[in-house]
Amino acid sequence: MRLGLIGLVALAVIVIPVGWLVAGSHGLWGALIGLALGGLFVLTTALLVLFTASLPATTAGAVMLGGWLLKVLIALGVLFALRGATFYDSGVFGMVVIAALVVLLGAETYGVIRTRVPYVDDPADEQKDRSDTE
């Protein structure tokens, strides 16, 4: 989550001025909306993972699936609401959404790879498995 936020801020520092240079105020709005949509889509997943970490796997999976469905509906709603709007540049918006998704997914992947999770076999489980097969 922290790495994702850092990546989003770093991306904002780059794309906001570039959006302004490419298309003026329309590019600025395209960059801001793209950052918000891309950030919302990926960071919400990280939040859901944190909140469902202590839940049973089936419940966590259901929450993740429901969260994904809700995010897709929100993204489609935003795209529908922006259809035909002229206050933002759609090219800048599209590029920033893609860049935000790539940066945030990269940050999440890096965080997962760097996380150390111990793997321990419980001797009691092994003993139980042996007694069940006998």
Image (cartoon, rainbow, N blue to C red):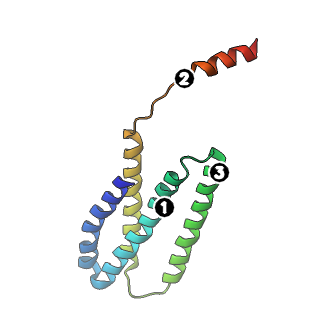
Q: What distance separates the C-alpha of mark 1 from that of mark 3?
A: 17 Å
Q: What distance separates the C-alpha of mark 1 from that of mark 2?
A: 33 Å
Relative to 44, is 25 on the left or the right? Answer: left
Residue extending farthest top: 134
Where, by quadrant of the figure, is residue 89 drawn?
A: bottom left
Image location (x, y in percent) of residue 83: 50, 83
Relative to 70, is 90 on the left or the right? Answer: left
Number of residues whose C-alpha sits closer than 10 Å to that of mark 3, classed few (under 14), some (14–19) or many (20 or more):
few
Q: Residue at x 51, y 77 (%)?
A: 78
Q: Is mark 2 in CB contact (under 8 Å) with mark 3? A: no
- Residue at label 3? 59
Q: Residue at x 60, y 48 (%)?
A: 55
Query: Which circle, 1 or 3, is nearer the viewer?
Result: 3
How many numbered marks have been drawn onto this rendered protein structure? 3
Q: Residue at x 65, y 54 (%)?
A: 62
Q: Secondary structure at mark 2?
A: loop
- Residue at label 1? 44
Number of residues whose C-alpha sits closer than 10 Å to that of mark 1, classed few (under 14), some (14–19) or many (20 or more):
some
The type of residue carrying mark 3 is: Thr
Vertical arrangement, residue 49 with respect to residue 13, above or below:
above
What is the number of the mark on residue 121?
2
Vertical arrangement, residue 50 with respect to residue 26, above or below:
above
Where does the C terminus fall, quadrant-wise?
Answer: top right
Q: Earlier in the sequence, mark 1 or mark 2?
A: 1
The type of residue carrying mark 1 is: Thr
Q: What distance separates the C-alpha of mark 2 from that of mark 3?
A: 25 Å
Image location (x, y in percent) of residue 34: 40, 71
